[in-house]
Image: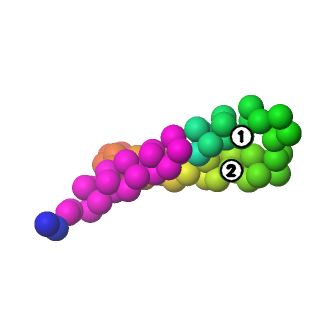
């Protein structure tokens, strides 16, 4: 099955959304520990933000350009 470019982007967005949700769950889980590893949590939060930025960038690429 060959996917066109928009389908590939939509598939990548779905993958990134899942990764974002996974990171959110992991961060929440680590945060409730008695002595949370703050460095690890900070690194995961940065990764989650990066993933969110990728999602937004890909979503914006799906919006067609409008000639002025």
Question: Which residue is most to the right?
Answer: 35
Residue denoted by label 2: 44
Q: Residue at x 51, y 40 (%)?
A: 21
Q: Is residue 34 above or below residue 26?
A: above
- Residue 31 x %, y %: 74, 35
Is residue 67 visible in the rendered image? The answer is no
Q: Is residue 24 above or below residue 54?
A: above
Neighbour class for label 2 at 10 Å: few (<14), some, many (≥20)? some
Magenta-tinted stretch = 3-22
Mark 1 against mark 2, which lies toward the viewer? 1
Depth check: give the residue in front, 27 or 4. 27
- Residue 54 x %, y %: 51, 53
30 with respect to 6 (left or right): right
Q: Residue at x 69, y 46 (%)?
A: 45
**Magenta stretch encompasses residue 54:** no
Question: Which residue is most to the left?
Answer: 1
Picture quadrant where residue 68 is located: top left
> Dot 1 lies on which element?
helix
Verify CB contact (< 8 Å) between mark 1 and mark 2.
Answer: yes
Question: Which residue is most to the bottom?
Answer: 2
Q: CA distance from mark 1 to mark 2?
A: 10 Å
- Count of numbered badges drawn on the protein: 2
Residue denoted by label 1: 30
Depth check: give the residue in front, 65 or 8. 8
Q: Residue at x 21, y 62 (%)?
A: 4
Neighbour class for label 1 at 10 Å: few (<14), some, many (≥20)? some
Dominant SS type (magenta): helix
Instruction: State which quarter of the image contains the N terminus.
Output: bottom left
Q: Which mark is residue 11?
A: none
47 with respect to 31 (left or right): left
């Amino acid at each position: 099955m060959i996917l066109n470019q928009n389908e590939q982007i939509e598939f990548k967005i779905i993958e990134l959304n899942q990764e974002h949700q996974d990171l959110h769950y992991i961060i929440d889980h680590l945060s409730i520990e008695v002595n949370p590893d703050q460095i690890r949590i900070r690194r995961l939060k940065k990764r989650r933000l990066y993933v969110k930025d990728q999602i937004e960038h890909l979503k914006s690429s799906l919006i067609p350009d409008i000639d002025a």
